[in-house]
Amino acid sequence: MAVYTHLASEDLAALIAAYDVGELVSAKGIAEGVSNSNWLIETNGKDGAGTGSGGVRFILTMYEKRTDAGELPFFLGLLDHLAARGCAVPATIHDRDGAAFRSLDGKALALIEYLPGISPDTPTPAQANEVGAALAQVHMAAADFDRTRANDLDVGACAAILDRCGETRLAGIDPELPQWLPAARELAARWPQDLPCSIIHSDLFPDNVLMLGKRVTGLIDFYFACDDMMAYDLAVTHAAWCFDRSGTKFAADVGQALVAGYESVRPLERSEREALPLLAQGACLRFTASRTQDWLDTPPDALVTRKDPMDFTRRWKYYAEHGNRVFA
């Protein structure tokens, strides 16, 4: 369960009392997520009228070591900015003093709007089409956001992560993994620098999207959001949505629908479309590198299932061999 810090019922009640949302009715730890502690919170509403199934729900997040509290004004401010512009993202609930987050025992906490929906396990073309449109809406709405954040997992940083791991340690994960070092260096050398940019999500896997049927009800977990190329974000989403979990089976119809949905809101420039095969390979490098680092940093006896970086080298190989046809 993704609750790394225990909060007593008294602590939770005191936290919720700092917000104008009613009294705490229940709090349940949420199993999803790997970086922060999360609870599903229910209150009786501002007027105290709602209880049980008629209560009001929120998500309470405690930010653990992986999230720098100094960056929360960017992340939470971005949610408020996008929500105010009609994007399907959860708004931040500010406390009675107007603060977007609070602190307890040295850790920051934020109360976030609860959005209904379920993350798709096997996305359909119709779902991918709607997600593409929602992603484009975020890119356009974020264009005038007044804060910035550099991408600390750009292609150069990710190539450097693999270099620092070294061939011996990489081979300890999988004998084929060191073979991707030259390709990583080549990607970093060829990476485009002049494509249109905005604030991007950069981690829009299916489990970061809530849907009711084919309707997008929420894009969540913006904690890797940063300034970067919009077409790169589309490529990240393509790599995340269009393959099975192991990266062995590609769903062309899902990929086509995703790009079509995006372009129904924001048509790609010719330079962006031509760059998509390379950008998709860079997306695969990003998750190969981050999963490799997590694999090596996680003790073998930890109660965490490590994600296989080879799931993304298989995607990477597919884009290298078929990318021009995939994005034709």
Image (cartoon, rainbow, N blue to C red):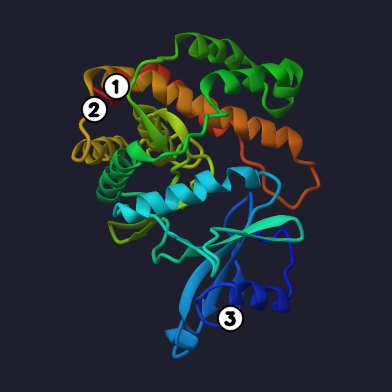
In the image, 241 versus 216, the foreground residue is: 216
The structure residue drawn at horizontal position 57% and vertical position 29%, both measured from the top left corner, is: 152
- Which residue appears farthest toward the bottom when viewing the image? 49
| Label 1–label 2 contact, CB within 8 A | yes
Q: Report the residue at 56% width, 28% height from top.
A: 153
Tag shown at residue 272? 1
Q: Residue at label 2?
A: 268
> Against 144, is 180 above or below?
above
Say which of 285 and 315 sits in front. 285
Q: Is residue 5 left or right of residue 93?
A: right
What amino acid is found at the position of numbered circle 1 in the picture?
Glu
Q: Position of residue 147 (x, y in %)?
A: 46, 38
Q: How far is disc 3 from disc 1 in space, using C-alphas?
A: 48 Å
Q: Give the mark nearer the N terminus: 3 vs 2.
A: 3
Q: Secondary structure at mark 2?
A: loop
Judge from the rendering whether residue 265 lies leftward or rightward of residue 240; answer left or right.
left
* C-alpha gap between disc 3 and disc 2: 47 Å
Q: Residues within 10 Å of mark 3 (few under 14, many from 20)?
A: many
Q: Quadrant of the C terminus?
A: top left
Judge depth for marks 3 and 1 and give the one in front: 3
- Indicate the amino acid at tag 3: Leu
Amino acid marked by disc 2: Leu
Would you say the residues marked 3 and 1 are in contact, meaning their CB atoms lie under 8 Å apart?
Answer: no
Of 155 and 96, the residue lying toward us: 96
| Label 3 vs 1, first from the N-terminus | 3
Q: Secondary structure at mark 3?
A: strand
**Residue 64 pos. (x, y %):** 69, 51
Badge 3 is on which residue?
24
Residue drawn where x is 25% and y is 49% of the image: 126
Residue 156's place in the image compared with 73, above or below, is: above
